[in-house]
Image (cartoon, rainbow, N blue to C red):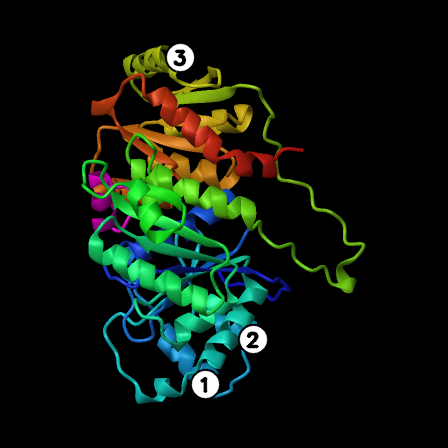
């Protein structure tokens, strides 16, 4: 998918950290995906701010076709930057987020030394016209490119961990930002936090003389998701406390810096409003549909939802049942439920095919896969199909109600968009 010419004034958010290994790239990538989830109509770009070797691509297993180093050469040559040119360098991930990646391998090009902070400023100014949010994963040094990105940003996310070396470097970074008069709208993220460690969150606040905006707990499941190149923020709270903390960061930033409204051109005035392709019902409860070819499994899930009702704030109602992918697609069109719990292995159209078909037609419906498959390959395919969560049948329990409510809440922006 290519971006189209437009007139935005997007928000630039820099992600900073002077020490490697603090999780800066993980936070930048997941922040971009989280903002795209929160605002489905917004165009979000994640930029790898390292001209010589990038970490953003490997985080999601994306191989760069062309990279920011080549883009830098183009800018340094004073070529005109237009929409067609930008489209040659950006890539869109299955999460709908766009990426401007660093080189796949360490590269050195002497011409890049001519790439100044003014050149970086030109890139950012042009990108702001086309994207609602530009997340820049800055390198681990305060070089001229990072300085230009910081000056252009509305928010600076400073990532640290509860270790002496990391906190020392963070204090230096905060001092540098203050000296450069760029100390406004700083969000401190305390990553990899373990309450059993000797350095406590309160001590971090006192040492840095800054409030901690979000604390991300140490999380083994999060490490596994990163190892498998999966978006951590799309995991449920039950699967990953770190994912829940990342969503808190997204909410704080997303509420303070809402997507800028596109500037309407005079030629567009008087254009007829397009009708929505469907209307998602506005309910005061969560409408649930169960899809499984085994009746006893549907009964078990129904029982678990009933037992878990007291753990959630919103009433759950099972309003549809289906025994195959084809039936699920048909019932989804008739009912337009809020959340579907669906098996993968079914005769005929399987759950992944059904999920893809439903999401293509009804993107406001949240889909949870409930399956015996726990392989990362299935989870990756599920994400491509538009699935919101993935629950192994071996872990079924009343907590499934919490997962349903969580997906329901995550899809509020999607439902709002399709409610007339």
* Callout 1: SS: helix
Residue displayed at 46% across by 39% down: 359
Of 28 and 190, nearer the camera is 190
Name above or below for residue 227 compared with residue 243.
below
Q: Mark 3 = which residue? A: 310
Asked if the residue under mark 2 is in contact with the one under mark 1, i.e. CB atoms within 8 Å, the reply is no
| Label 2: few (<14), some (14–19) or many (≥20) C-alpha neighbours in 10 Å | few
Cα separation, mark 1 vs mark 2, equals: 15 Å
Residue 343: x and y in percent read 31, 27
Whether the magenta-drawn stretch holds residue 369 is answered as no
Among numbered discs 2 and 3, the one appearing first in the sequence: 2
Q: Quadrant of the C terminus?
A: top right
Residue 333 visible within the image: yes
**In the image, which residues are magenta?**
217-230
Front disc: 2 or 3: 3
Whether the magenta-drawn stretch holds residue 227 is answered as yes
Name which quarter of the figure residue 92 lies in.
bottom left
Residue 382 visible within the image: no
| Label 3: few (<14), some (14–19) or many (≥20) C-alpha neighbours in 10 Å | few
Among numbered discs 1 and 3, the one appearing first in the sequence: 1
* Callout 2: SS: loop
Name above or below for residue 302 compared with residue 211.
above
Q: Mark 1 = which residue? A: 76
Q: Mark 2 = which residue? A: 82
Name which quarter of the figure residue 277 lies in.
top right
Among numbered discs 1 and 2, the one appearing first in the sequence: 1
* Callout 3: SS: helix
Residue 109: x and y in percent read 30, 85
Asked if the residue under mark 3 is in contact with the one under mark 1, i.e. CB atoms within 8 Å, the reply is no
């Amino acid at each position: 998918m290519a971006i189209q010419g437009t007139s935005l004034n997007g928000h630039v958010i820099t992600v900073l950290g002077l020490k490697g290994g603090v999780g800066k790239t993980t936070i930048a990538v997941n922040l971009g995906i989280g903002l795209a989830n929160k605002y489905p109509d917004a165009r979000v770009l994640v930029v790898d701010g390292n001209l010589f070797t990038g970490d953003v691509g490997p985080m999601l297993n994306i191989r760069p076709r062309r990279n920011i180093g080549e883009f830098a050469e183009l800018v340094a040559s004073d070529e005109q930057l237009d929409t067609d040119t930008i489209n040659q360098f950006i890539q869109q991930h299955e999460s709908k987020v766009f990426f401007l990646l660093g080189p796949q391998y360490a590269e050195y090009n002497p011409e890049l030394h001519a790439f100044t902070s003014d050149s970086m400023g030109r890139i950012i100014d042009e990108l702001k016209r086309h994207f609602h949010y530009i997340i820049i994963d800055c390198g681990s040094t305060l070089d001229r490119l990072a300085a230009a990105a910081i000056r252009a940003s509305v928010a600076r996310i400073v990532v640290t961990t509860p270790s002496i070396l990391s906190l020392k470097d963070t204090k230096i970074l905060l001092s540098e930002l203050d000296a450069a008069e760029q100390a406004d709208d700083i969000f401190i993220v305390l990553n990899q936090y373990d309450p059993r460690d000797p350095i406590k969150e309160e001590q971090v606040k006192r040492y840095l003389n800054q409030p901690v905006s979000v604390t991300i707990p140490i999380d083994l499941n999060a490490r596994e998701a990163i190892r498998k190149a999966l978006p951590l923020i799309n995991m449920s709270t039950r699967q990953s406390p770190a994912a829940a903390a990342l969503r808190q960061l997204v909410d704080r930033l997303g509420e303070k810096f809402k997507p800028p409204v596109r500037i309407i051109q005079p030629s567009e005035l008087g254009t007829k409003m397009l009708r929505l392709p469907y209307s998602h019902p506005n309910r005061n409860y969560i409408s649930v549909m169960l899809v499984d070819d085994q009746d006893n499994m549907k009964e078990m899930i129904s029982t678990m939802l009933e037992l878990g009702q007291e753990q959630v704030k919103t009433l759950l109602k099972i309003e549809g049942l289906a025994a195959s992918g084809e039936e699920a697609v048909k019932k989804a069109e008739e009912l337009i439920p809020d959340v579907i719990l669906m098996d993968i292995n079914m005769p005929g159209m399987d759950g992944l095919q059904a999920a893809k078909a439903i999401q293509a037609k009804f993107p406001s419906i949240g889909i949870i896969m409930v399956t015996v498959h726990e392989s990362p390959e299935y989870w990756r395919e599920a994400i491509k199909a538009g699935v919101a969560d993935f629950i192994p049948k071996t872990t079924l329990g009343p907590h499934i109600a919490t997962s349903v409510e969580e997906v329901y809440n995550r899809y509020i922006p999607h439902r709002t968009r399709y409610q007339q």
